[in-house]
Amino acid sequence: MVSIAFPEVPDSSKVVDLDFTSAEFRKNAHKLVAEWAKNPPFYVVKDGPPQVIVGRYPEVNEVFLDAQRFASQLPKGPGYEQYDKFIGTQFMTQMDGDQHARLRRLLMPAFSSRRMQQLETDITGVIDKMLDDIERAGPEFDGMEQYGAKLVVGALVATMMGLNEERRQILLDYQDILPIAITIKPGQPYPAECQAATKRATDLAHQVITERRAGLRSDFLADLVNARDQGDKLSDEELFGMIFGLFGAIAATSRSAGGALYTIYAHPEALSQMIANHGLIPDAVEECLRIANNGYFTFARVATRDTEVGGTAIKKGMIVRPSPLAANYDPAVFPDPLRFDIYRKPKRIMSFAVGPHHCVGNILGRTTITIAIQRLLARFPKAHLADPNFKPTYIGAVGELRLQSLPMRIQ
């Protein structure tokens, strides 16, 4: 195995002992992340290169905006496996400069207002069918398993990608192995189940590209395949990366939707106001995305030179991890940040990043969650948590807090 020399931590007094894979961290994550928002960047030293955790709003913003000092394309090799989110496939979130700008330019037409309007109509229809299923099986239901998580399968994968049930399951199986893949020890091969799920997803992506090139469907993926800009177009390899990356981005919507559902139903007074006035829902969703997006890390960066952020020295080659959730908890920007306030009207939240890597699908994500909340409140105005003292359990890959379940009742 090739040995890689990682940079040394410049100041051992700023090292914090954290295990992001532990149940203990997940249990206390929101309180811990809120502390990151009030303190300078610090170091975490585990397997692989030292990590610099950045939590205060101005410094998270600084890292997002400065691709010269903090590059999105990370090194390969032992110790860096945990950052290879798509197991060898490169998505444009892991690119910078002209390469990133070109792919983003080619991607934008697929998010045209015409396509978004069609998707909004389709998503509303799928969500209504999901609520039909919940009503038939009621009065008890799992707000995460039967609703939040199903937004990925039904409302987004089905409508955006036009995949049948068998093909959707291939992508879901791939999603399920990602947390395993990014927790392997340096130098270890990916487990057999990870390799098998990745191969099935790879084969599916190639099939989908071939079908769309043949003009067999007109949908979001077909828009990607047919995208042109002054004669330029996406190669098969780039399309392959787009499909994987978009599915990863879509999957984040279930995490955000689960966080939004729990937050709203854990605050009965706010819930009753939203039921009485649906006009409050869009602002309430934005507040949910601030306080409960539950993505405490986004794609990691690597320092391209010796530098500093917020008074913390960063050596060339160190991994830099800006925390969008911590930035959303910065009390200097969002007073009393852990209080859920549907009248807050938060501006410039970090849930979708900022700068060159601002999420191109942010409008679709916001729209999907807003529709899901609107239809649920209209259909079941008496729905509530099955246990008013419910304490959530979080699962998922490093960087995310995904609700394991959310027991609810229709009435």
Image (spheres, rainbow, N blue to C red):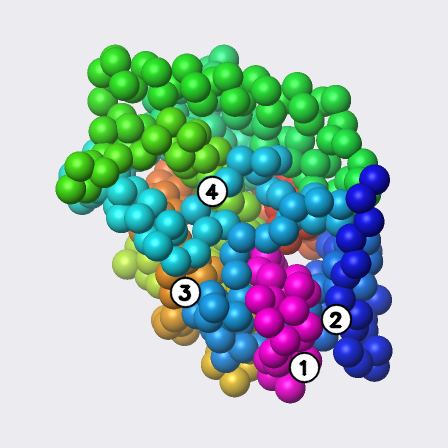
Q: Which residue is mark 2?
A: 43
Magenta highlight on residue 313: yes
Q: Residues within 10 Å of mark 3 (few under 14, many from 20)?
A: some
Position of 255 with respect to 51 (left or right) is: left
Callout 1 touching callout 3 (CB < 8 Å)? no
Callout 3 touching callout 4 (CB < 8 Å)? no
Q: Secondary structure at mark 2?
A: strand
Q: Quadrant of residue 378?
A: top left
Give how far apart the Cα atoms at labels 2 and 1 are.
Answer: 9 Å
Asked if 38 appears above or below 383 in the picture, the reply is: below
Q: Which residue is mark 3?
A: 354
**Identity, as a three-letter code, of the amino acid under mark 3:** Val
Give how far apart the Cα atoms at labels 1 and 3 are.
Answer: 22 Å
Task: Tell which of 336 and 400 is nearer to you.
Answer: 400
Q: Which residue is mark 4?
A: 91
Which region shows up in magenta?
A: 294-321
Give how far apart the Cα atoms at labels 1 and 4 are.
Answer: 30 Å
Q: Residues within 10 Å of mark 1 (few under 14, many from 20)?
A: some
Precedes in sequence: disc 2 or disc 1: 2
Give how far apart the Cα atoms at labels 3 and 4 are.
Answer: 17 Å
**How far across and down, in percent of the image, does residue 371 sit?**
34, 44
Q: Which residue is mark 1?
A: 312
Q: Residue at x 38, y 65 (%)?
A: 355
